[in-house]
């Protein structure tokens, strides 16, 4: 059993290390746009001013960004959804008025095989049809299927594929797995691809599920194994290292391989992993603090990461985190042409914990406001150390809803409590800590986009 006096010194030390410096100028407000979705995979701002959304089981809908009205425009009957597979990425033709084409990626079954294809659908004003297959029989699996799509200004389609759980395929230029592929919008192979007659544009990818473009640069997010999630800049013919290289070229083996193969290193990497997914470039003045940042939503880490770029836009100069554990797993992020930001949850994907109304699409707005500084919070637990129950007392100088998270000193998540909005800012909560093992924890209060941490000891 821990005594109350022994850990006191350790407490102070850990507090000073783990206090999260809050960015005091920004608060995020959330507005739920749509609920009742099932694993929205792609969210796009359509030329009609509606959100165009894929759901993994095979549905494509238009969702009104103000009213939340959902209009189903097609259900693809042969989609095979299992594990990570199903209906995945989508892109719209950039000249939609003249060419109302929608490009989507989905997995299907042929006997016992799982395969992935890229198709083009045509919108007739109320529904999608006239399916045309552009690229077929990409080997799939129940994990590592990619697959994000974007149309570049040169009217080619970029496609990220996963290694379909066979890592060696990523270095095999004959395989379509573990690649970024580039095809014309009619499915033919562009004449200037690096390997004549091949859609392979870059190789050595594990499972990229985020892809975005801005002013000559293509950015992608990629899932690592148990280490080294990555953000990459995708360039013609480059090798991104998987499975020999994970993250940076920083071990002797990796350095040899990187030198021999001109490996492109990521511009950001994460260990422990965060499960990075949807990625969008933010170029708008609507949220000035985010201008020229990459917005990355994450599944496992359940947050939005804002990666601010330098003036070359090839280097990350800061990482800021928002929505930490507020909405659960996040898979899709959409930036409208005038800078509105929408995110989609992924709590019904088989790995999440659905909350009421999930899955949902939420619009984020950032307000510059007076966010309480640490010293203006009144926040304590009683009794402390806590046993089977504790009361958390909190007085906020602002009206807000709050959430409390406990992690142990190894950073492992142990418990989350969500508390409702209180206009008077006075909160008193009963916490059932009977299922939490004795030990020292870091209690983190999430208030809008801000977090405040302090130690909490639980004894038996
Ligand atoms: Ca890599
Ligand atoms: Ca490495």
Image (cartoon, rainbow, N blue to C red):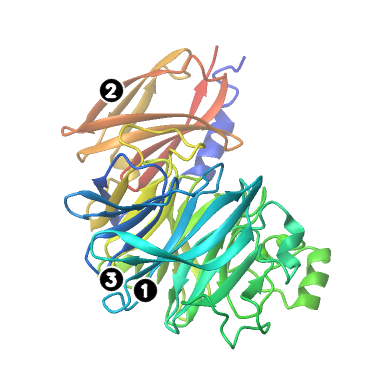
Q: Is residue 16 above or below residue 309?
A: above
- How much space separates mark 1 and mark 2, taking CA atoms? 53 Å
Q: Which is nearer the N-term, disc 3 or disc 1?
A: 1
- Find residue 29 and report its horizontal and vertical position in percent: 25, 49
Ligand 2 quadrant in view: bottom right
Q: Which residue is mark 2?
A: 428
- What separation in Å lies between label 3 and label 1 (alpha carbons)? 15 Å
Looking at the image, which is closer to me, 432 or 261?
Answer: 261
Answer yes or no: do the residues labelled 3 and 1 have beta carbons within 8 Å?
no
Identify the residue shown where x is 36% and y is 61%: 129
Quarter of the image that includes the N terminus = top right
In the image, taking residue 57 as reference, residue 199 lies left or right, namely: right
Q: Residues within 10 Å of mark 1 (few under 14, many from 20)?
A: many
Secondary structure beneath label 2 = strand
Total numbered circles: 3
Of the 4 image quadrants, the one containing the C terminus is top right
Q: Is residue 20 left or right of residue 449?
A: right
Q: Secondary structure at mark 1?
A: loop
Q: Which residue is mark 3?
A: 337
Q: Residue at x 38, y 23 (%)?
A: 381
Q: Quick check: 173 left or right of 107?
A: right
Report if the CB atoms under discs 1 and 2 are less than 8 Å apart. Answer: no
Q: Residue at x 32, y 79 (%)?
A: 95
Residue at the extreme bottom: 191
- Mark with earlier residue (1, 2): 1
Label 3 – label 2 distance at C-alpha: 43 Å
| Residue 69 % position (x, y) | 20, 49
Element type where label 3 sits in the image: loop
Percent across and percent down for residue 50 are 24, 60
Query: Mark 3, mark 1: which one is toward the viewer?
Result: 1
Query: Which mark identifies residue 93?
Result: 1
| Front in this rendered view, residue 7 or 215 | 215
């Amino acid at each position: 059993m821990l005594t109350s006096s022994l850990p006191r010194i350790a407490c102070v030390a850990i507090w000073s290390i783990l206090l999260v410096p809050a960015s005091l100028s920004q608060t995020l407000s959330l507005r739920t746009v749509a609920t009742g979705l099932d694993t929205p995979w792609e969210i796009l701002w359509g030329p009609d001013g509606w959100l165009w959304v894929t759901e993994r089981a095979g549905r494509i809908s238009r969702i009104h960004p103000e009213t939340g009205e959902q209009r189903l425009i097609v259900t693809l009957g042969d989609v095979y959804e299992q594990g990570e597979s199903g209906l995945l990425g989508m892109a719209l033709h950039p000249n939609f008025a003249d060419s109302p084409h929608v490009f989507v990626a989905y997995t299907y079954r042929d006997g016992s095989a799982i395969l992935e294809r890229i198709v083009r659908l045509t919108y007739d004003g109320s529904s999608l049809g006239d399916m045309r297959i552009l690229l077929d029989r990409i080997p799939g699996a129940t994990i590592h299927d990619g697959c994000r799509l974007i149309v570049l200004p040169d009217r080619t389609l970029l496609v990220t594929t996963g290694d379909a759980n066979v890592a060696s395929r990523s270095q095999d230029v004959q395989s379509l797995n573990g690649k970024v592929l580039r095809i014309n919008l009619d499915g033919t192979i562009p004449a200037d691809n690096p390997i004549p007659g091949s859609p392979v544009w870059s190789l050595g990818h594990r499972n990229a599920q985020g892809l975005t473009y801005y002013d000559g640069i293509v950015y992608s997010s990629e899932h690592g194994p148990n280490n080294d999630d990555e953000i990459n800049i995708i360039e013609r013919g480059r090798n991104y290292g998987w499975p020999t290289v994970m993250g940076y070229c920083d071990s002797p083996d990796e350095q040899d391989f990187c030198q021999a193969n001109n490996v492109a290193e990521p511009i950001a990497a994460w260990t422990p992993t965060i499960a990075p997914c949807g990625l969008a470039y933010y170029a708008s003045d609507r949220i000035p603090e985010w201008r020229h940042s990459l917005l990355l939503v994450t599944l496992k880490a359940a947050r939005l990461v804002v990666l601010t770029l330098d003036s070359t836009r090839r280097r990350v100069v800061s990482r800021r985190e928002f929505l930490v554990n507020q909405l659960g797993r996040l898979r899709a992020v959409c930036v409208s042409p005038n800078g509105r930001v929408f995110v989609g949850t992924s709590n019904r994907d088989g790995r999440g914990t659905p909350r009421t109304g999930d899955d949902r699409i939420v619009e984020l707005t950032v307000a510059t406001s007076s966010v309480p500084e640490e010293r203006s919070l009144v926040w304590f637990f009683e009794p402390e150390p806590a046993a089977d129950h504790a009361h958390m007392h909190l007085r906020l100088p602002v009206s807000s809803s709050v959430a409390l998270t406990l992690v142990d000193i190894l950073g492992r998540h142990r418990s989350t409590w969500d508390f409702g909005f209180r206009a008077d800012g006075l909160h008193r909560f009963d916490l059932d800590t009977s299922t939490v093992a004795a030990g020292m924890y870091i209690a983190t209060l999430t208030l809008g986009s801000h977090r405040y941490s302090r130690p909490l000891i639980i004894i038996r």
